[in-house]
Image (spheres, rainbow, N blue to C red):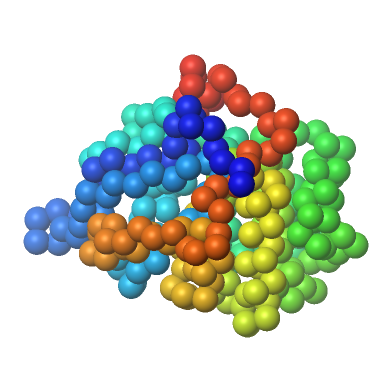
Amino acid sequence: MNTVAAAEPPLVALAGVTKTYGSGSATFHALRGVDLEIARGEFTAIMGPSGCGKSTAMNIIGCLDQATRGSYRFRGVEITGLTRDQRARLRRRYIGFVFQGFNLLARTSAQENVELPLVYRGHGARERHAAARSALAQVGLAGWEHHTPAELSGGQLQRVAIARAIVTSPMLLLADEPTGNLDSQRSVEIMDLLVALNRERGITIVMVTHEHDMAAYAARVLRFRDGVVVGDERQPGTPRAAAAPAGAAEDDAFAARAGA
């Protein structure tokens, strides 16, 4: 069984992370001192009731929000003190996002939707076109490049969203209720796709879900309640971590220049 090298730090490490909104009598403590580590190559599901802090934790991991207190390290580098621009660069380079609502541009083709992250990174048109077609093929949508969202089913829309998330070859894929708008058959198809991306490409996946049957696809389940982690269990019969992609070179510049 493939394992992540012992010398490698956790891809994600939260220590004593709190998140507070409001002040005085209106104060809401979304996170109350979260400690967790996620190794590179793991497929982790986060579960818990509404308001338990799971989406807040995902937003902090994805650099969409900042902790009020505590430490967040990505690949061993402290992220808490990064500027807004540095966090944005980290997101563009290392993290992909999949949302329940797909978040696709309605009047734009599947290929153009998938190309968007590459536009933000300054890639040329020819490179963008080739990468987007490859990503769509990887999610089973070869031949659908020029269809708009209105011409696609819910399952196909989520596949386009996943292709957009992986077109930059991220280390970490964050999926927030990725099957929440899908029927049972399409949900299974999307989960099979996420498992394949994890096991075959070594992409680390962190998925928020309310659904126990979807969480069963993950190798590990973290349970949140009232802003803290109250459970951490390994799923029987699933690997601890997938291998990193063959030939993938570590970006040493990340450790030397966080967020660049």
- The location of residue 250, given as percent across then percent down, is 61, 26
Residue at (29, 46) in percent of width and height: 35
Residue occupying the far right of the picture: 143
Camera-side residue of 21 and 199: 199
- The quadrant of the rendering that contains the C terminus is top right
The image quadrant of residue 52 is: bottom left
Residue occupying the far left of the picture: 25
Residue at (72, 30) in percent of width and height: 247
Q: Tell me if I can see residue 124 in this picture.
A: yes
Q: Tell me if I can see residue 92 in this picture.
A: no
Apparent side of residue 133 relative to residue 243 in the rendered image (left or right): right
Residue 2 against residue 185 in the figure, above or below: above
Apparent side of residue 253 relative to residue 245 in the rendered image (left or right): left
Residue at (39, 60) in percent of width and height: 233
Residue occupying the far top of the picture: 256
Residue at (80, 43) in percent of width and height: 131
- The location of residue 81, given as percent across then percent down, is 34, 29
- The location of residue 153, given as percent across then percent down, is 74, 76
- The location of residue 248, given as percent across then percent down, is 68, 31
Residue 165 against residue 73 in the figure, above or below: below
Residue 54 against residue 17 in the figure, above or below: below
Number of marks in the image?
0
Apparent side of residue 179 relative to residue 106 in the rendered image (left or right): left
Residue 178 against residue 166 in the figure, above or below: below
